[in-house]
Amino acid sequence: MKTEYNKYMVYFIAMIAALGGLLFGFDTGVISGAIPYFQPYFSIDDAAVESITTAGLLGAIVGALFCGRVTDLLGRKTVILASAVIFAVGAIWSGLAGSPAQLIVARLFLGVAIGVSSFAVPLYIAEISPARIRGRLVSLFQLMITIGILVSYLSDLFFADNANPACWRPMFYIGVVPAVILFAGMWLLPETPCWLLLKGREDESRRALARIEDPALIETSLSRTKDEIAQNRERAGWREIFKPWLRNALIIAVGIMFFQQSVGINTIMYYCPKIFLMAGFADNISAIWASVGVGIVNVVFTIVSLYFVDRLGRRKLYFLGMSGILVSLVCLSLCFTFNRDMGDAGKWLSIITVFLYIIFFAISIGPLGWLIVTEVFPLKVRGLGSSIGSLSVWIFNSIVAFTFFKIVNAFTLPGAEITVQGEQAGNPAGAFLFYALIALAGIIWGYFYIPETKGIPLEKIEKHWKEGGSPRKLKDANF
Ligand code: BGC
């Protein structure tokens, strides 16, 4: 009976985990289909669009920055409940925005919830799930981000209506639905046993454990958590993480997130209907349709990568993916360079290359970034290391989102402008070539820094760093 009950609880946790990831992805993607409508609605230029998109990311930086401390202070559950409220209020606020300035503030506010949930939800899952399914639930979170992006593209498509200039409003409103479900679900779930112990609330911790764990394992699990807490008390935090023996781990975490973002993935995620309009699509709806295709390909190939990551290993996937990204970016750049001469064929060729680019990203540096960041740090600084990883993502992501159209315009040679819906616009050929150069740098960097962590126990990785081993030699190290 008991195990049955636990199983339901675990499914329930998985569902909530899924929702946290879905909301994160949804609010990442929703802006893309809304842009082609709110841009003419408010008559704003690309720079203002960049500011609105980046506002959400700045909010995420703030959320990720303070989240560690707040989740320790108030508890994981309380913080996730609060973030569900911010998600809901932010969604309505964005939809109601009466001016671009209001939209900026609303997205900034909502961004805080994205940043908070990108840290607090995986933390909650990791602490509350029974050890045997922990890994699976954490990677489920990653997959759900991509599903959330797809859902947002689909709902954008559902609400897109060329006859209604205000159709971007319901695109934002609908984000309330998953937020309310997250709130209700989270309300029913217990606080994590680990946090309760941390606060000296041992009885409550035991009761929380009783709702998830096998009764025979409760006391063992309790004392293991106590040990872990005692270990964590000793952790030196920031000072430790900057010590020379962890330098490589730090370079790997920040470096891989730098390349994950700087190959320009989110220029496609946020601006893809706009990019398809630049490629020659005549109207918003068909451009959003093409984005739905991007969303589907992203989900499917993220699943493919989950299958391959422990079979092919990290380095092979990295080089395969990054080389593919490099080639597709060069092709995309060529497509835009010869855009005028190729007519309709150019449009289709650029779609195909965008799809190839997404495939190579989704099988490699997308999921690998998040995975490797959790692997390279020793337990003592793993939490801090992962938060440095998430923070790097949001910072680099904001820089890319904020500069995309500026780079497009700066790298448009005189006479190379393209026509988007009857108006002259910058040509993104130079921008994609620029991202291609970053991908090339990423390949060279990866040769030295991407560690092959496949099948290597995490304690061995720590030992390797302590012995002064290089990332490239990890696989061959003699343990
Ligand atoms: C990245 C996100 C990106 C997503 C696309 C993730 O790995 O961190 O910035 O939007 O992949 O699937």
Image (cartoon, rainbow, N blue to C red):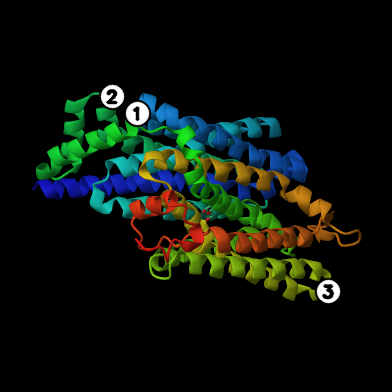
- Numbered circles on residues, count: 3
Q: Rate crowding at label 2 as few (under 14), some (14 to 19) or many (20 or more) other CA atoms within 10 Å.
A: few
Callout in the foreground (1, 2)? 2
Tell me where residue 102 appears, x and y as whole percent: 65, 30
Closer to the eye: label 2 or 3: 2
Q: Residue 132, image x and y in percent?
A: 24, 53
Give percent across and percent down for residue 71: 39, 30
Q: Is mark 1 on a helix, strand or loop?
A: loop
Tell me if 389 is positioned left or right of 75 in this view.
right
Q: In the rendered structure, are the residues bearing label 1 and label 2 in contact, judged by CB atoms less than 8 Å apart?
A: yes
Residue visible at 47% across and 52% down in the picture: 468
Q: Can residue 451 be seen in this view?
A: yes
Residue to which mark 2 is pinned: 199
Q: Earlier in the sequence, mark 2 or mark 3?
A: 2
In the structure shown, which secondary structural element does the residue marked by tag 2 occupy? loop
Give me the disc on residue 75.
1
Q: Mark 3 points at which residue?
A: 341
Residue at image point 77% right, 66% down: 336
Q: Nearer the viewer, residue 127 or 346?
A: 127
Mark 3 and mark 1 lie on one chain; the one further toward the N terminus is 1
Q: What residue type is labelled 2?
A: Lys
423 lies above or below 476: above
Q: How far apart are marks 1 and 2 (CA)?
A: 9 Å
